[in-house]
Amino acid sequence: MSFPGRNFLAACAALVLFVCLALTSPASRASSAYEAELPANVHTAPDMCALLPCADVFPGATYFSERKGQPPYVEAYDNDSANKKLLGYVMLSTDITDTPAYSGKPVVTLIGMDVTGHFVGVKVLKHSEPILLLGIPESALIDFNNQYIGKSVTESIEVGPSRPDEGVVGLDAISGATVTVIAQNQVVMMSGSAVARQTGIIAPIVRDPAKFITLGQKFTWQQLVEMGAVKRLAVKPEQVGLPRDATPFIELWFGDLNQPDIGRSLLGDNGFASLQSRIQPGESAFFIVRTAGDESFKGSGFVRGGIYDRVQVKQGPDAFTFRDLDAFNLYGLEAEGAPRYTESSIFVIRSPAFSAAYPWKLAFLGNRVDRATGHRSFAVFESKYWMPAKFLDGGRPKVEEPDAPWVRVWKTQAVKIGLFAALLVLLTIVYAFRERLTRLSTHKNKWPVNAFKYSFWAISIVFVGFGAMAQPSITQVLTWFHSVLFQWTWTLFLTDPFIFLFWIFIIVTVFLFGRGLFCGWACPFGSLSEALYKIARLVGLKRFQFQLPQVWHDRLKWLKYVIFFGLLAVSLFSMSLAEKLAEVEPFKTTFLVGITNRAWPYGLFVCALLGLSLFIERPFCKYLCPLGASLAIPSTFRWFGLKRKQDCNSCKACAVGCGAQAIDADGRIDHRECLHCLDCMILYTDVKGCPPLAKERKRREKDGLGITPIGKNGYFIPITPDTSWQAQISAKAANGPDPRMPTDSVHVPQLNEASGIKRLAMEVLEHLNPWSAAGWKHNRWVSMLAVPCMIAAIAAWVLLAMGHISTSAMIICWFIWSLIEVLLRLDGRRYVKDGVWWNSRYRYANPMDMLAYVAFKNLLIGAALLIAFRAVNWTVA
């Protein structure tokens, strides 16, 4: 059936453009907190409520004090008269914690709490979550925050169902924004608790005082560091938004001074005795020295009677701050090998809630500058300290740390997570035995295969997509990519267990079988799209269903790769813009938010795609899906492919019935496009449906010969041992290309003929060296120009290690070199490995094969180098 391909392409492009224009419209950001502008001095101005709408989070309050306490808060009063009544407190979340949300940036929140510890208002002032601008309306976040009103900071509040038997108060999550709301819950509870402890709403935790063991010996500085009695806290310039430099922004060393052996080692006998005479029983002292950096840990704005606003000690939920009377001069360190320092002090913790026997953290408080906007945000840098056990009578006490938020998520949904994991394992096992299922099927009875496939579709659509909302997305690919290259954070991915497990499944199966198992059997939207196509066929629309002409399919299939690489390139400059453009995926609208909860352009886009799915099999999957494109690239190197026989190069039966149109004129399967419907595998052993087998079967029946089983090669097993199965191959097929390989086999002498360590060494050299004698002969100028480019790429890695260029600049250099390498290899080393990686089976590389190979190889090399640099503290994101 003919089809106006140009019109179809124009319609697709118009839809994508329409959605993108709708998303980037300035009106869409009206009155939004997304990347909202905050006053430049919002974190330092004494009168915070002159800059921020404190009355919005504390109804009834008409007067607000200046900032008090550490971390700071303001008091809310009913009026400003002499008889004013204290109503409660207002706090800015980023004055207390910079807990990042899914975007990697904190959600700046204003919080109101009354004098009894009950929340009275929560207002988001600024966030960087694109999903709350595009995928989910901000009203959902407002509704989420409103759940805190009336709840107490003393309660155990978690995202998820309430568990009265455990004393847990649950909050309804925002569908599709699990990470964001878990981070927001942590922000609200940490902020409320910090102020509640300062103001006496929450009683301090009582810890047993430390009982020291005196060993009667002095230690050198190195010994103190090795045993953990002295610790280091270093902040790099990059961590506060300054240009990278080998010199730290600030480097601090600190440690306990109460234990006699440690105290005498650091201060000397006289110094330790003097300190003990100046502190009271139950008080604890520790020292801080600055050994590098120009920043002061005391703070340039410190005045007599004021608070040291740069340092805090945290122990559990308690935070301890220091005034001028809590600090003594430190005149020198007497431990042998002690470093030179430029600033020093002894601080005294006077609260009985502190115990030197328990772990504590030194926190350095500062500001982080966003180099793109110039805005400052609150930042805390911490280093943990715990007295060595040998100095404590009875050793270290047992401390039960509260579970991290992601751990609580996994625990509370353990049964669902277990069932989901079992589903993925079952799917993998079923597919691994696909050949047994296809041998039980015929082209007229596909139910041994379809029973499993349709069941997985139904589970994927109903329970995975609409139930668990675990639809993988290209935004996750971009997040993984940025995390590998810039800063890996496990908790960011572990917070959403279903997506985390799904990606483990995807990564494993893509390298085993290609993208088709996920895309064809497990993707919720792909399953929905093909289910609609099958249902339309059953209800009488089959006569209207068609495939695009192969020539147009072969052109349009590249569109998804253009979209993917475009999103990847945009994400290097603006992740938020990339996430907006990623709305080319209909997943958020379909599963996470719902068509009725979004603006009409989103719904129209989804309806158009699903409407086309009634007449064209999986149009989005084949032509637009950037997620499918990202998975297709490593699918080039899948270990196990679908089977082909020699006659497939002349028989078109499989190609005609291939819904993915992944079989070319030579009968070869493109595993980047194959969606693993397994129809071709069913025909592979179907003695009535496969034309070569049917022909051989009829010949044997006519000659009265026995019908033997079908062998692994797809032909009847020979009747007698001396009969060759090659006799069953038609002459036309025997003289044609071998469809069992995606492209023609290539013999590489230096790899095919070597063995053992030599072959391994040669293969490593093949990966690293793109030049070849054939390449120099074929295109000398390209080979010559590539030499300085390679030198420049190596120099860029060295400069990155030395801290002279940014990671982003390195990625651009590496990308340019990768393109040059593709050209070099196409001229001389035009082959890639096929099948399992430890074999030596090579085949001819078409441009897409080579692009996929170089992109995947260089991504692994780049990621490995960046991880190695971070491991030795050479570079940071």
Image: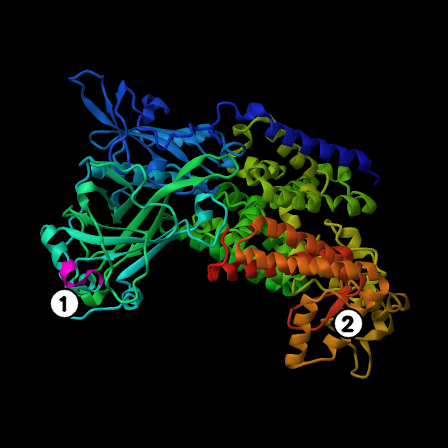
| Residue 448 occupies quadrant | bottom right
Which residue sits at x=25%, y=59%? 386
Return the residue nearer the eye: 844 or 807: 807
In the drawing, does residue 322 fall left or right of residue 42?
left
Q: What element carries label 1?
A: loop
| Amino acid marked by disc 1 | Thr
- In this view, 322 is above or below 258: above
In the drawing, does residue 809 fall left or right of residue 665?
left
- In this view, 728 is above or below 871: below
Residue underneath mark 1: 214
User: Could you tell which of marks 1 and 2 lies nearer the N-terminus?
Assistant: 1
Q: Is residue 216 highlighted in magenta? A: no
- In this view, 88 is above or below 819: above
Residue underneath mark 2: 716
Give, as a single range, the part of the protein colored magenta: 266-272
Q: What element carries label 2?
A: loop
Residue 614: percent from left, percent from top:
69, 38
Mark 1 or 2: in front is 1
- Cα distance, mark 1 to mark 2? 86 Å
